[in-house]
Amino acid sequence: MKVRILYFASLREAVGRASEELDVPAEVGTLGALRAFLAARGEGWEALGVGRNVRAALNQRMSGADTALSAGDEVAFFPPVTGG
């Protein structure tokens, strides 16, 4: 299934890109599985790994790791932000 992935702020810097279209394997069916799949790419990508403070939105709605993915979804990953 193909999904569009957006990377923001320090995550964009860590992975070296702002976005990508990715055809993910069938076993990558949730946001959590997608994060693990991406983190396994190696250097820089570990910024998305388990235990890292990363937020995710699916189709512009904040979503948890167990949220199911569907073909054509837009996934955004970003670090937490602070305001003042």
Image (tube, grey):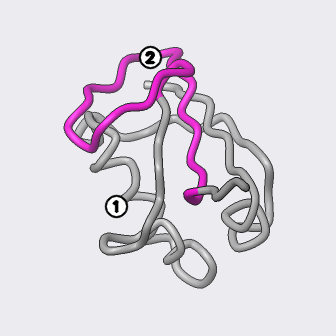
In this rendering, the label closer to the viewer, 2 or 1: 1
Q: Which residue is mark 1?
A: 36
- Residue at point 47%, 49% (across, down): 55
- Looking at the rendered structure, the kind of residue marked 1 is Ala
- Mark 1, Cα crowd under 10 Å, few <14 / some 14-19 / many 20+, is some
Q: Secondary structure at mark 2?
A: loop
The answer to which image quadrant residue 26 occupies is top left
| Residue 31 lies within the magenta run | no
- Mark 2, Cα crowd under 10 Å, few <14 / some 14-19 / many 20+, is few
Q: Residue furthest front?
A: 84
Cα distance, mark 2 to mark 1?
18 Å
- Residue at point 40%, 71% (across, down): 49
The answer to which image quadrant residue 60 occupies is top right
Could you tell me residue 72's position as x and y percent?
53, 15
For the magenta stretch, what is the residue range?
A: 58-80
- Residue at point 79%, 57% (across, down): 17
